[in-house]
Amino acid sequence: MACTFLPKSSPPLFHARRPKIHRPKLKQFIPKSSDAQIFGLKFHFSDNSSPTFLSAKAPICAKVSKGDVPPNFSLKDQDGKTVSLSKFKGKPVVVYFYPADDSPGCTKEACAFRDSYEKFKKAGAEVIGISGDDPASHKAFAKKHRLPFILLSDDGNKIRREWGVPSDLFGTLAGRQTYVMDKNAVVQLIYNNQFQPEKHVDETLKLLQSLSL
């Protein structure tokens, strides 16, 4: 009788391959050769530059509070002239910090201050906008949108840090914060709202009108 011997185990017909799973990198980057605006921040990269990663920075704790007399500063305006905060003592002053010239939110905010500028003048108040842009950028921004008030260049964001303007989005976005000082240079209002820029004007006017009563 013929016998047929079978192998103890048969080899598998095929080897199953695990599907590759695409895992997105946690870091975000901006490609080379680009000019980009992200949440009001402007970035420029040349052809020879490497991709730049957006890293979170520690937020800045508030240093200027309601009831304080903030530190003086001297900065260049859109015409290249040096302007000191102490120059305006004796009248109410509105100082608003914003992320960048010509970004959508900052343009809305600046135009809202422009449209209500006569009301600020009637209240005897001076309006001053501050960002890290240079005087040439401020000049173009003011001309483009017919801004009648002072724009100051905070090179290196030194004054922003001294005043303790908080950042947003885990430190990746320069804060949008407004300070209202009375005629004695005492802070009476601090208003922070990154994503409703026009509200800064409404809240500021309410406070100024109450001071004039």
Image: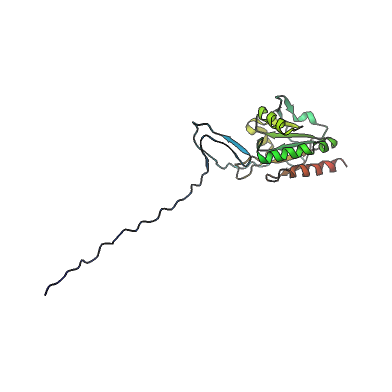
- How many marks the image carries: the answer is 0
Task: Tell me, yes or no, if residue 66 can be seen here.
Answer: no
41 w.r.t. 73: above or below: below
In x, y percent, where is residue 137?
Answer: 66, 30
Quick check: 55 left or right of 71? left
Percent position of residue 79, x then y: 71, 25
Across and down, in percent, residue 120 comes to: 81, 37
Q: Nearer the viewer, residue 148 or 87?
A: 148
Q: Quadrant of the N terminus?
A: bottom left
Q: In the image, 62: left or right of 20?
A: right
Q: Is residue 20 visible?
A: yes
Q: What is the quadrant of the C terminus in the image? A: top right
Looking at the image, the residue that sits furthest to the front is 144
- Please tell me in which quadrant of the rendered image residue 110 appears: top right
- Write down the quadrant of residue 82 in the picture: top right
Point 65% across, 38% down: residue: 103
Viewer-closest of 28 and 210: 28
At which x and y percent is residue 83?
74, 27
Considering every residue shown, the one lying at the far left of the view is 1
Residue nearer the viewer, 90 or 106: 106
Q: Specify the quadrant of the image occupied by residue 174.
A: top right
Nearest the camera: 173 or 15? 15
Farthest bottom residue in view = 1
Colour pattern: rainbow
